[in-house]
């Protein structure tokens, strides 16, 4: 799996999830429960992961949606 985004911004996570779901790109939000446990300190951000095979399509979708600045460097999960 490849990490696309790492953030504490719940609105951004929700937006990215809806884009990926609409495009039929499988994804997983990691550390969601850990983020809740640590409170509002922002120490443990949530991560949006996709299969490596779908990473390029997911990145292109998020760039088109205007959230390119939030993307993690390519190849971080390979």
Image (spheres, rainbow, N blue to C red):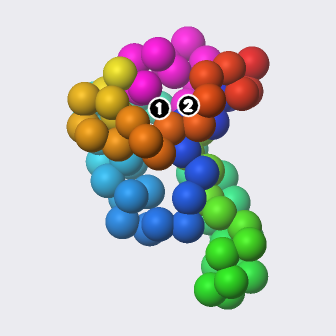
56 to 35, vertically: above or below: above
Q: Secondary structure at mark 1?
A: loop
Q: Secondary structure at mark 2?
A: strand
Q: Residue at x 39, y 48 (%)?
A: 17
* Image quarter of the N terminus: top right
- In the drawing, does residue 24 fall left or right of residue 55? left
Near mark 1 (Cα within 10 A), the count class, few <14, some 14-19 or many ≥20, is some
Q: Which residues are magenta?
A: 50-59
Which quarter of the figure has residue 61? Answer: top left
Residue identifier under label 2: 50
- In the drawing, does residue 24 fall left or right of residue 40? left
Which quarter of the figure has residue 25? Answer: top left
* Image quarter of the C terminus: top right
Work out whether residue 4 can be spotted: yes
Q: Position of residue 59 (x, y in %)?
A: 43, 26
- In the drawing, does residue 25 fall left or right of residue 65? right
Q: Position of residue 64 (x, y in %)?
A: 25, 29
Q: Is residue 54 magenta?
A: yes
């Amino acid at each position: 799996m490849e990490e696309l985004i790492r953030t504490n911004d719940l609105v951004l996570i929700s937006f990215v999830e809806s884009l990926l779901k609409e495009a039929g790109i499988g994804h997983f939000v990691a550390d969601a429960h850990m983020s809740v446990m640590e409170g509002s300190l922002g120490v443990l951000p949530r991560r949006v992961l996709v299969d490596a095979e779908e990473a390029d399509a997911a990145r292109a979708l998020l760039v088109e949606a205007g959230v390119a600045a939030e993307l993690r460097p390519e190849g971080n999960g390979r």
